[in-house]
Amino acid sequence: MTISGADALTASWLSDALGTKVTAVQTEPVGTGQVSDSLRLFLTYAGDTALPVTMVAKVPAADPSSRAAARAIRTYEVEASFYAEVAERLDAGVPTCYFSGYDPEPDEYAVLLADLAPALPGDQLAGLAPADAAAAIAEMAALHAAGWDDPGLAALPWLNRHDADSAAFTAAMVTDLYTGFKDRYAAELGPEVIALIEDFLPSIGAYLAERDGPSTLTHGDFRADNLLFGGPRAAVLDWQTCAYGPGLADLSYFLGSSLPVEVRRAHEKDLVQRYHTALTGRGVALTWDDCWTAYRYHTFHGIVMAIGASMLVERTARGDEMFRTMTTRHAHHARDLDSLALTG
């Protein structure tokens, strides 16, 4: 039971999805996502119910290029499956889900989530303050500890999507997209950032194929825009790219993308140590040296994401500024930590 887009969020459809008679619904756009459309719903029910009067709905994007990108990387299937099969077991800041559905053909989905207002999203462009980053890292460690080397998660086909063929496909796709990315952004990124990317790209295939070490539930796009602050705990949204993979990729991507460069440099070691302490405090066996080395290695996760996402989803002015900002931060991150030395 899914829908093709925002226009199909009718009182009748919502009544069926929620199992309670909805007599009226009003909607307003919310969030900055580009791969799906998000709306706040104002609901009127026919009778008494424990359900909230506002929710947030995520539905397929109206933009055709974003829809095509979603199909190519299975984002609708992944997010619907996460909320249907995994979210409830997690002791972390994940919104309550009231409905989740996915139809593989024609690749449509819908999820109805708790409205966490008045909590506010982080600002990807301005970046996070260290205190907010620390709060988010506490939730990340809880998520990773819950799925650390979990055979049940490893057995889920929609979550455990990594293999040699998928790594080769992604490497080829990102390499092909880089020409357009460079044409669009090189003048503003500057020669140092472009040089770092071009030094990395010859090793992208081996980088993406590497999966040594433990795996866990990873978010895949853990950054400021996908976090809410101001509630009882930081909340983690947008589970469209979650996977079973290396947890330190989330941490490196988060600090590299979501903190201004000078803020990251000043607080990086302390924040990584916070993650390590929180993770091991939940029973995970991970040495500090292994944690730090993996953190350095995965600085390129953000560059891969920036090239792919910027060229596949609907182009917007904010999107351009965000991808330029994130790419610059990730390049400085990789250079600061001499991460190229770890890619071979």
Image (tube, helix red, strand yellow):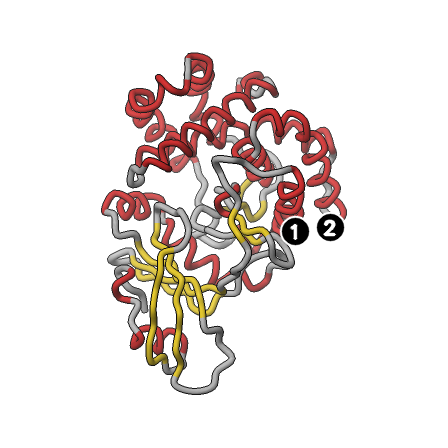
Report x, y in % for residue 302.
48, 32
User: Which quadrant holds residue 16?
Assistant: bottom left
Q: For label 2, count other residues whose C-alpha is less than 10 Å away and answer few (under 14), some (14-19) or many (20+).
A: few
Question: Is 136 drawn above or below residue 307 in the view shown?
Answer: below
Q: Tag 1's secondary structure?
A: helix
Task: Give, as a three-letter code, the residue at label 1.
Answer: Ala
Pointer 1 residue: 142
Image quarter of the N terminus: bottom left
Q: Residue at x 26, y 52 (%)?
A: 62
Q: Residue at x 31, y 65 (%)?
A: 2
**Residue most extreme to the bottom:** 47
Is residue 216 left or right of 106 when viewed as pictured? Answer: right
User: Which quadrant holds residue 184?
Assistant: top left
* Residue at mark 1 to residue at mark 2: CA–CA distance: 8 Å
Pointer 2 residue: 282
Q: Tag 2's secondary structure?
A: loop
Q: Is residue 73 in view?
A: yes
Is residue 318 left or right of 151 when viewed as pictured? Answer: left
Task: Give, as a three-letter code, the residue at label 2.
Answer: Arg
Report x, y in % for residue 235.
57, 54
